Image (tube, helix red, strand yellow):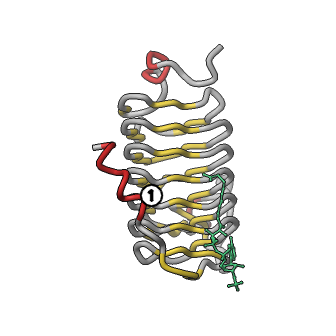
Amino acid sequence: MNSFYTEDELKELPIKSFGKNVLISRKVSIYSNREIVIGNNVRIDDFCILSGKIELGNYLHIGAYCALYGSQGIKMEDFSGLSPRCTVFSASDDFSGNFLISPTTKKEHNHIIGGEVIIKKYTQIGAGTVIMPNLILQEGSAIGAMSLVTQSTEAWSIYAGTPAKKIKNREKGLLNFIKEYE
Ligand SMILES: CC(=O)SCCNC(=O)CCNC(=O)[C@H](O)C(C)(C)COP(=O)(O)OP(=O)(O)OC[C@H]1O[C@@H](n2cnc3c(N)ncnc32)[C@H](O)[C@@H]1OP(=O)(O)O
């Protein structure tokens, strides 16, 4: 059996819409009230979790074992990507000590904080990275492996570390290839 869903099978998943050439592994878990929009030429590999409101552009790859927690929205623009084992949080509990942290406790005892995560065009996230809520990774950002991203990035910059800091500007040579995909 093919390891990716067929087009007919994709129509049965809780996805609002999807384009052409969308390859989603049968081992991906999707938890969403039809709030996921997927463009063209997208591949999502084994053991990923897609939850909540997620918008994926064109020419995207999400590597194995990534988790996208989109209760407050996650947007990935064209030609962006997640290397394996990345986690993108659009919401988080309050770790201050003033609230309980569990989906099994009363809602009034929890404090969820967060906001949309926007990953702009041509941004690539290195393996094992954690992206925190309410930020924008500007066009052409690159994030080193095993980073913790707590703030928005500057365009065409490379960040790395915990928390992630800018280490250098990023080249723009990839833009030479883009007209072949328009
Ligand atoms: C889709 C796929 O490819 S799947 C495979 C997954 N691939 C990845 O995750 C690749 C991610 N790439 C990286 O992490 C790279 O190290 C990059 C892009 C962040 C930087 O690469 P380069 O531009 O070659 O930078 P370079 O190796 O010269 O490092 C520059 C500095 O940043 C530091 N650094 C590099 N990567 C990291 C990192 N991930 N975390 C923390 N610090 C880092 C280096 O130690 C060095 O520090 P120094 O100047 O104090 O010595």
Q: Nearer the viewer, residue 22 or 103?
A: 22
Q: Quadrant of residue 39?
A: top left
Q: Nearer the viewer, residue 23 or 177?
A: 177
Percent x, y for residue 80?
46, 54
Image quarter for residue 89?
Answer: bottom right
> What residue appears at the point 57 percent right and 61 percent down from the top-left corner?
125
Q: Is residue 14 above or below residue 9?
A: below
**Ligand number 1: quarter of image:** bottom right
- Residue type at mark 1? Gln
| Point 44% across, 47% down: residue | 54
Q: Nearer the viewer, residue 10 or 42?
A: 42
Quarter of the image where one finds residue 37? top left
Instruction: Using residue 12 as the reference point, say whether residue 66 is left or right of it.
Output: right
Tally the numbered discs.
1
Residue in the image at 62% along x and 75% along y: 160
Q: Quadrant of the N terminus?
A: top right
Residue 22 horizontal/vertical position (percent) = 45, 31
Relative horizontal placement of residue 71, taking residue 28 as reference (left or right): left
The residue at label 1 has a CB less than 8 Å from ligand 1 = no
Q: Secondary structure at mark 1?
A: strand
131 vs 37, left or right, is right
The quadrant of the rendering that contains the C terminus is top left
Q: Is residue 12 above or below residue 151?
A: above
- How many C-alpha atoms fall within 10 Å of the one at disc 1: few (<14), some, or many (≥20)? some
**Residue at 62% from the left image edge and 26% from the top image edge:** 26
125 vs 18, nearest the viewer: 125
The x and y percentages for residue 134 are 46, 69
Q: Provide the residue designation for mark 1.
A: 72
Q: Position of residue 49 (x, y in %)?
A: 61, 43
